Image: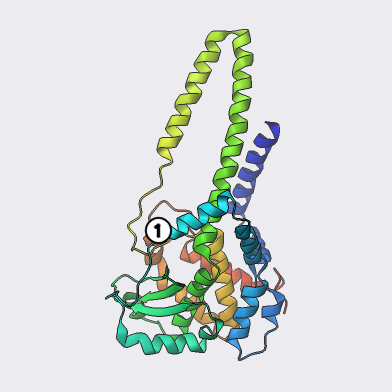
Amino acid sequence: MKKSLFLIVALAATFISNAANPDRMYRKLIEKYDIPAAADTVAPGDPSAFWNAVIDYDAPYTDFLNDMAKDRGAEKEARQETAKLPRLYPQYDQSIVEGMQGYCDSLLTDMGIPSLGRNCALYVVDSDQANTFTALTDNGFAICITTGLMGRKGVTRDVVMGYVADEFVHGVMQMHTQSYYARAKKDRKEKLMGGLLVAGTIGLVATLEAIDPTPADDYYDYLDNDVDVDVNVNVAPQFPTPKFFFKYLPELEYEADLLAYRFMQYMGKGADYINGLKILGSSYDALYGPDTDQPTIQERINFLEYATSHPEAGRRKK
């Protein structure tokens, strides 16, 4: 009981500390998610080798794959939830702008993605909404960029490359499933801790009943009512989002930014990645709705600027 309470207090203290000191949080994220040394030493002009090094030697992603291979409760739940996500069927979707397909295929080739064998495609889709997203397909995933975003002032081919790099990381690192898996593990831990707290409460009630039955009954009734209120209040908010919109785990959003940004730096286009975030701006934040734990565009920019100004952080060495 004491250990459970201590853990709750420790987690709360960590959250408060990170919120008050974003630089500390940024450094921890870089230490955990920065590109492996194998990617940092890839010779210029070989983007496929860069991506292969990131995918093959990324420690957090490797840990995730090893966990999923165990195929236990949380792993099965993550797979089941991923299977429920809507699929994009490019051969039937009328929103895909076919006249842009040559542009899309050429861009992927310049990024070294087709040779990776990852069943990844890029499409421009017709929508007034300025958005970029990853949609699952029958045999892989598709990166989609809306015409509303492509038409924005300042969007160049290099800026689009940054958007594609970010979404490619989401898809190739299976971040849909990673998010479900992390949440499934969190739910199981909370249920376990909740069981310990209930056991401790029952012990407290028994003690109070031995002293005075009436106060104990009142306390137990109050606890029941309080739990019911929590369950009702914590209903997931509804977001006015497009069909393929997905809320990734916040840490994974930062990871995707960092790995994509490192790729753009490798290509000599790091500034274009940050410019792309600036073009997305607050209108992109609005897609998540007012009540969300997702990092804002400005927080993502701040994170990457911190990574740029602190090359000593994480695994990346100059």
The correct choice, above or below, for 246 with respect to 36 in the image is: above
Report the quarter where the N terminus lies.
top right
Residue at the limit of the structure toward the left, as seen here:
94
The foreground one among 58 and 226 is: 58
The correct choice, above or below, for 89 with respect to 219 in the image is: below
Q: Quadrant of residue 284?
A: bottom left
In percent of width and height, residue 72 lies at: 59, 51
Horizontal side of residue 152 vs 196, given as left or right: left
- Which residue bears the numbered disc 1? 288
Colouring chosen for the image of the structure: rainbow
| Residue 148 in view of the camera | yes
Report the quarter where the C terminus lies.
bottom right
Amino acid residing under circle 1: Tyr
Q: Give the residue drawn at x 61%, y 27%.
A: 199
Q: Quadrant of residue 127?
A: bottom left
Q: Residues within 10 Å of mark 1 (few under 14, many from 20)?
A: many
The foreground one among 129 and 80 is: 80
Horizontal side of residue 217 vs 208, given as left or right: left
